Amino acid sequence: MIAPHLPILQVVIPLLAAPICVLLHSGRLAWLLTVAVSWVSFAVSVLLLGQVMDGGPLSYELGGWAPPWGIEYRIDALNALVLFIVSGISAIVLPFARASVEREIESERVYLFYTAYLLCLTGLLGITATGDAFNVFVFLEISSLSSYALISLGRDRRALMAAYQYLILGTIGATFILIGIGLAYMVTGTLNMADLAERLPAVSGNRTVQVSLAFLTVGICLKLALFPLHLWLPNAYAYAPSVVSAFLAATATKVSAYLLLRFLFTIFGVEFSFEAMQLGVILSTLAVLAMFVGSLVAIFQEDVKRMLAYSSIAQIGYIVLGISLVSVDGLTAGIVHLFNHAIIKGGMFLALGCIFFRIGSVQLHDMRGLGRRMPYTMAAFVVGGLGLIGVPLTAGFISKWYLVVAALEAGVWPLAVLVLASSLLAVIYVWRVVEVAYFQPVPDDKAAAKDKATLGEAPLSMLLPAWVLIGASIYFGLDTSFSVGVARAAASSLLGLDLAEIGS
Amino acid sequence: MEIPGLFNYWIVVVLMMIGFYTVISRGNLVKKIIGLNIFQVSVFVLYISMGAVAGGTAPILAPGIEHYANPLPHVLILTAIVVGVATTALGLALVVRIHEAYGTIEEDEIQAEDERT
Amino acid sequence: MSSSAVILFCLATPLIGALLIALSNRRPNQREAITLATAAILFVGVASLIPEVRAGARPELLLGEILPGLSLYFRVEPLGMLFAGVASFLWIVNSVYSIGYMRANLEGHQTRFYVCFAVALASTVGVAFAGNMLTLFIFYEVLTLSTYPLVTHSGKPEAIRAGRTYLGILLSTSIGLLLLAILWTWWAAGTLAFSEGGILAGRVSDGAMAVLLALYMFGIGKAALMPMHRWLPAAMVAPTPVSALLHAVAVVKAGVFTVTKVIVYIFGIDSLSRVADAGWLIYVAGATIVIASLIALRQDNLKRRLAYSTVSQLSYVILAAAILTPLSVAGAALHIAAHAFGKITLFFAAGSIYTAAHKTEVSQLAGIGRRMPWTMTAFTIGTISMIGLPPTAGFVSKWYMLRGAIEADQLFAIAIILISTLLNAAYFLPIVYTAFLNKPAPVDKDDHEHGHEHGEAPLPILLALGVTAAGTVLLFFFADLPLDLALQLAGRSQ
């Protein structure tokens, strides 16, 4: 009975829970509600993914209004996977949140924190689930506004400026998207994605359509933090509360990457986006620059959270590079990396959250000797780092593998070389942390003597979620049938191919 | 190109550039938000004017009205205005908090403050 | 037990051992007993596969698919059998040695040491038994990572610096070059399985084959082909048991083993010999042999001299494999075993001298043979094997290499082998000479650290030393088993 309504439940449950959170007015209860909601969301996304993989795309008519007049929610392999990532990360991050949020956010604001969190979750899930272009903008703003608020809750006052800057750039990005959608509507008279996809090819020579694509691409790339539109990201991730960094790093840019895929491939179509407009060259150039600039800047960061943020910029480069190759293998690489990077980066930010919980800092020089004081946390961080490098047996290796194969297949072997060369930069920034944490003596001055509680591991409720994600990054490095399988299905449907035709 | 016939688009472009320029060039955080508002308004105008139908009136269901403007952009922009107001409110709230924390709302002074610590 | 279960058993034993060692953190006796037991069990497991492989069977194990068409797959063939056999046998000896060495030198973090050692051995077995290039690559990388904590064991600044060099060179070659080569192979051939006759033949052009060969050869950094050799001398900051088993046997042999595997099973001897541009490998390997020997001549630090000797000896294997005749390939395989026994003996001796006398430089060794006769006798046997004289294992492998080179009319290779024999003698024999014939330097009474009267090293060290020295000689007289496996690899029965 519930099964046909799953697409809407995915979005509505967290949306309704948000005001309830305000009414509860208690941090603990709000947390309990949020945990329950995100676990239910996760269950819904699992069911959805199952339905889509078995029976093909689902279409849900909101309020019974038939598309294209009513809003349609349309779930295919690609957005089912992204829903799975977003709600899954949320379900894992939340148990972590209780202790971490208590430590980092004033107690009278905790329930508001969870309200904003739920709204952000709603927005991200909504962007992904909807099949209506204008609806995308609305959910985009819901998630953005709540994430500005979430970021501004960070302890450091620089969090405020970070949130403000993100607000300015994010709003410009969202407005660009709004312009793009408006121009597309102007030409076609529809906002339904499937409808747009049908009508756009007929008018592809129209200047308005070209401008529309340009605005949309720039707007989405701003939200995606693709180099050189990444300026908001490092500060936002660095100064946000630990939970928020972990959640946003793992989900927000992934959802933007999904939007890019949806608009370029489904709505405007491969022929227009990549042949008429030549976006592939632009995107791959920027992606390669992102890979190198992101990693190079990461090497020089003293704040480890900032370091991970710059590393994210590089990793987004890999995702976009895969997309820009416009082949089944390339898209598979991009989508698999979207999934793998969410897991790896989420896990690493959670590990950093544990560290912040204990020593109250994520500066590199404060992490001296941490390998002995928090062995399990640091081990999680190092294994995650190996995933970023792309060492075999981790999920990162699988992404790199597909990316390089796709580059070779496209006949651009220099890209293959660049991908591998840039992975080596990751070795450097990961190893800086390793050397400090394992080889430098524990600072014996204030921190150690002052407070016994700063010694030892974070509570299990924090350590366990970090390890769940890190464990998943190893699991998906060994058994790729799920991640690669879904990614391949999504890739072939984006290219309009039948999965059976192209083989495994 | 027939400039007078497309004057609404020219207004959109001019407004957009004014807003954009304000956001980029001003160091005062409130002025930036004002710029952002102008920028958003330009898009509202774009939508509304695109829904206009020559000779049409407001889309109200009443006897005698047969020729009316496309109502959908109006509805959309109603939503966008709400979003815009929310963004402005949040932005201003942040500015208040920044003022509390730094004692200034000039971007360069804030930067100097951050570098000192 | 079926033979695939035995393979799984061999892979799992060291890992379970590592876990148990980690759990007995505070109980040194229990920890070391577990290490020894694990090593012994592993050897029994590996040895039990030998009769089958010798009879021509190729036991397999499939551990699930990682990527579509690419599995974690193991297949034991003669060369892997030889490598795994040597490594697992020497692990037992090395464990005995480690116990003596680590305790006598009061090293810290011993649990971490033994855990990493066991993981390194597990990955060595994984490399040896790998049935396709992906599986091999996975264990190759795990081996690099698991030995990093061993290299930086002391935690001193020079150890961290050495660790950077170690990891930097090994990871950048393996990710930057080797992985690229593997991916190219996969893309071009559609398979990565090791198969007789190679998988690249007819699938890529000759030019591409030459480029691929370069990517593979320089990408396998563990084989220490110049200029990718610098990690090996750097790794000498590790405790001696690490240098002995890992940086004279497991890690470096994993390198040349991979080289041989790639040449035999990826390129195929016959198809590679048809590619005109592939001849450069002989020259690079030859140059490495001579240059590394010349550098070794100038090293005063004993372990560094041994390290450069290893660089040069590793290139023998590459040279022999690059000659591309069955006999020389058999020589390459034999040399993996022969050099392992000889070099581990030399390292054991160096560690023994360090433990008993705290001496690390060649120039300090005058007259030490009178105080440590057992150690220096074993050292002499190792030396003879390095030079390649009978009655030691080194002679047998060099003999096959030379025969292969003569068969292929490779004058350059013959010349290199002869010149380097002289060079080997030049940098090893003076050590033996001064140790036995020179008078010890007058003892400085104030220098208690270096000048004290010392005798032999502790018993476990001597025991280990004796076993490997004896092994070096025995391999000369009873060379049937390794020879048989090596010739099977080359596709010739005896």
Image (cartoon, coloured by chain):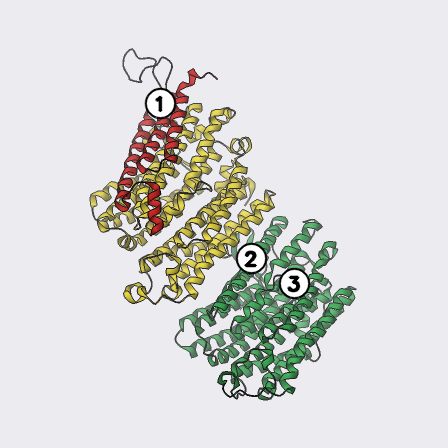
Chain colours: A yellow, B red, C green
**Residue C131 in picture, x, y percent from top left:** 59, 60
Q: Residue at x 20, y 46 (%)?
A: A25
Q: Residue at x 60, y 87 (%)?
A: C440
Q: Which residue is mark 2?
A: C172
Res B98 seen here:
yes
* Left or right of residue A216: residue A7: left
> Which chain letter matches label 2?
C
Question: Which of the labelled discs sits on residue C127, or is there none?
Answer: none
Q: Amino acid at mark 3?
A: Thr
* Farthest-out residue, top: B64
Local secondary structure at mark 3 = helix
Q: Quadrant of residue C192?
A: bottom right
Q: Amino acid at mark 1?
A: Ile
> Which chain letter matches label 1?
B
Question: Which of the labelled discs sits on residue C260, or is there none?
Answer: 3
Q: Residue at x 28, y 53 (%)?
A: A104
Local secondary structure at mark 2 = helix
Task: Report the quarter where the C terminus of chain A lies.
Answer: top right
Q: Which residue is mark 1?
A: B48
Label 1 environment density (alpha carbons within 10 Å; few <14, some 14–19, many ≥20): some
Instruction: Please name whichever residue, C317 or C198, is drawn nearer the observer in this view of the structure.
Output: C317
* Left or right of residue C2: residue A3: left
Label 3 environment density (alpha carbons within 10 Å; few <14, some 14–19, many ≥20): many
Q: Amino acid at mark 2?
A: Ser
Local secondary structure at mark 1 = helix
Looking at the rendered image, the disc whose residue lies closer to the viewer, 3 or 1, is 1
